[in-house]
Amino acid sequence: MTPRDWIHSRAKQMRAEMTPHEKAMWRLLHEGELIALNWRRQAAFGDYILDFVSHPARMVVEVDGGQHAEAQVIERDEKRSAWLRAKGYHVIRVWNADVLKEPNDVWQSIQAAAFRTQAAARMLRWREADRARACEANARIASSSMEEAPRSGGGGAPSVSNIEPPEAHSSPPLVSPPQSSLRDDSSSIEEERY
């Protein structure tokens, strides 16, 4: 097996075994206009496997655990980031805990970085298309509810009914269920304290 084949095989294995933090990040990258960036997960790129990459935005998002705070790993991460920057990619590193505890902040920082890339227009087109889809769906809902309104008595022409109101019948009134003997106690709460 060649090194390239091994990297692709390992990336496939990593996609099948994503950590909870990576799964949460994957969901974040598919919210709002970030979905327009065509993210790939555990993607082989050069000699590396990137957690998440958007080639249209030329962005990489790495989700880092505690081991990335160790000196040897920091050095390796810096070397990798330098190689990616040389290829024209912007690298964003996010701690595992932040993905789960501060997802809105993580999403906003990725979105802000993405708007500074060549893919900003792609995100804006997605936003406009999404807004148009939402308006269209709202219009369908409004028109279908207006069609049902006269039948359901929810507006339109007054409803005509042949059913008599319950007061028109001479049946005996409904009896309430038996009450506890405590309900007859009329002492106030203040009197019960002493």
Image (cartoon, grey):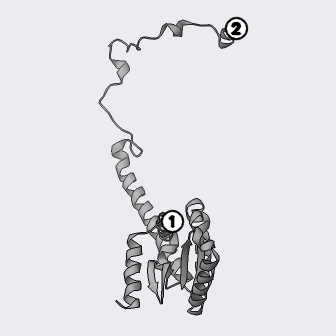
Residue count near mark 2 (Cα–Cα under 10 Å), binned few <14, some 14–19, many ≥20: few
Q: Residue at x 32, y 33 (%)?
A: 161
Kindly give the residue lying farthest to the front in the view shown. 72
Disc 1 and disc 2: Cα gap in Å? 59 Å
In the depicted structure, whether residue 151 falls above or below residue 7: above
Percent across and percent down for residue 147 are: 35, 53
Residue 75, disc: none
In the depicted structure, whether residue 123 falls above or below residue 107: below
Percent across and percent down for residue 112 are: 62, 75
Q: Amino acid at mark 2?
A: Tyr
Q: Which residue is mark 1?
A: 21
In this rendering, would 135 be left or right of 153?
A: right
In this rendering, would 63 be left or right of 15?
A: right
Residue 96's image quarter? bottom right
Q: How many marks?
A: 2
Q: Residue at x 36, y 24 (%)?
A: 165
Q: Residue at x 42, y 11 (%)?
A: 178
Q: Nearer the viewer, mark 1 or mark 2?
A: 1
Is residue 169 shown to the viewer in this render?
yes
> Counting residues from the N terminus, which is met first, the one under dot 1 or under dot 2?
1
- Disc 1 secondary structure class: helix
In the depicted structure, whether residue 16 falls above or below residue 144: below
Residue 194, disc: 2
Q: Amino acid at mark 1?
A: His
Residue toward you, 68 or 171: 68
Residue toward you, 67 or 158: 67
- Disc 2 secondary structure class: loop
Is residue 117 shown to the viewer in this render?
no
Residue toward you, 111 or 129: 111
